[in-house]
Image (cartoon, rainbow, N blue to C red):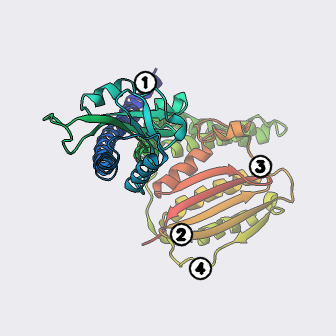
Amino acid sequence: MKIKPQKETDNSGTRPFVLVKAFTVSSLVVMLTATIVIAALNAHWVRKILLEKSKEYNQLLVENLNHQIFLRFVWPVVFKHGEIKLREPSQYQLLDTVVKNTLHSFHVEMVNIYATDNVIAYSLDKAQIGKKNAGGVHYEKAMKKKVTSKLVQQGNRIELTFWFPQETKIVTFAPLMQEVQLTREKDRMVIGVIEIIRDVSDDYQQVFKLQGLIVVSCATIMGILFLILRFVVKHGESIIERRAEERLKLEEKLRQTEHLSAIGEMTAGVSHEIRNPLGIIKSSAQLMEKKMAKLDPSSNIPGIIVEESTRLDRIITDFLDFAKPKIADLRPCCLEDIIEKNITFLSSLDEHKDIKIIREYQGSLPVSDILGDSAMLYQAFLNIFLNAFQAMDQTDGSITIATWHEPGFVHASFTDTGPGIDEDVLKKIWTPFFTTKEMGTGLGLGIIKNIIQAHHGEISITNAQPSGTRVEIRLPAAQ
């Protein structure tokens, strides 16, 4: 029941980053869409300006062409021949020369000159000459002295939809005006219509390239911003998750500490109550054993009582050692010296004389490398050695002891050649009263851990490769 609120707390902690992520994605989509719309509007505005400039440019060309045609063709021909007859090769050649010289280098694709009866009288494309009613509405407006222009675009449906056709041409119809009064009429007469077709595809392609460059640039910037924000959000989420995991571990450790504290108080109380009558039972059994040795030497019942009382006393001692707080008397000492005292003691025991001890000391540790309680560390290391000896059934096993230091800490590791620990068991080894031994209490590792924590150190137990168990201890170095 306590886990669910913690999960809800974690979700509520990460919810702001989920909202930030959603806001980031949505805002980037909106910004990219707005950028595309703005780019399209800018391109439309540029196209509109380009169209207006093209119209003005064509009007200037028409005015210049109108002036040159009247000055260099109409006036001389009328003055010399009295009338204009383009069917005569000399007159047509003269008009063709005037038009080409006037529009040379202005990138004009086509020029058509209409007579007053809407028939093409002159064209750069001679196949167009003689066509009737080819001017349409624009011809009628030009005859009324109005200059009109239209945009003609060619391409497939996609090109026309996205405004980048393959060909874009601007067609301008303008009246061919009589600049000098040849009659008595006050108004200037319209003597024909000029049609100019100019290819502006390159200009429109530049507009499309500009539009595409704007869209691609904005999309690239948006993508970079998205990646940066994504990284920030991801990093924030990882921080939140890491802090949530740390909080869960601290809460679990607090619950475990409270649980162990309650168990310790209960164990201490029960142990004290048991130890007094146990001492009476043991002393009575020892007295009985002396008397039974005279009355019935074959009876071993008093000895069994004494032996079991002694074992029970050791169990109570473990309970008390586990329950009572460990307060270390910290003094400068050498970690390797304490380990050597354990080795010296164990070497004197016959049951462990076949176990090989391998030392891999760093050799550069200072004389007083740690601040510790020698007696407590001796007990912790002794329990580690005894556990390793019990794990190795073979008589030719070995224990490798290594020491090294890093800035601020001193390390010691104990690696045996036993079968190792099952993964399921490895997860429970720190649980009080959990043991795989028939005669064990499950408090040995807890006592070791309490001693190491009393020295502000850390202990870890893992399986070694290819086999065996590795116990590593890290203790603060002496300042």
> For this view, does 272 lie left or right of residue 143?
right
Say which amino acid is labelled 1: Asn
Q: Which residue is depicted at the point 59% across and 61% down?
A: 378
At label 1, counting other C-alpha atoms closer than 10 Å, the crowd grade (few under 14, some 14-19, many 20 or more) is: some
Above/below status of 160 relative to 365: above
Say which amino acid is labelled 2: Glu
Q: Which of marks 4 and 3 is in front?
A: 4
Which residue carries the number 4 mark?
364
Q: Distance between the residues labelled 2 and 3?
A: 30 Å
Which is more N-terminal, label 3 or label 2? 3
Residue 133, label in figure? 1
Which is more N-terminal, label 4 or label 1? 1
Which residue carries the number 3 mark?
391
Q: How far apart are marks 2 and 4 (CA)?
A: 11 Å
Say which amino acid is labelled 4: Ser
In this rendered view, identify the residue nearer to me: 421 or 97.
Answer: 97
Q: Distance between the residues labelled 1 and 4?
A: 109 Å
Say which amino acid is labelled 3: Ala
Residue 69 position in % (x across, y down): 33, 48
Q: Which residue is depicted at the point 53% across and 79% down?
A: 367
Which is more N-terminal, label 3 or label 1? 1
Marks 4,3: beta carbons within 8 A: no
Which residue carries the number 2 mark?
406
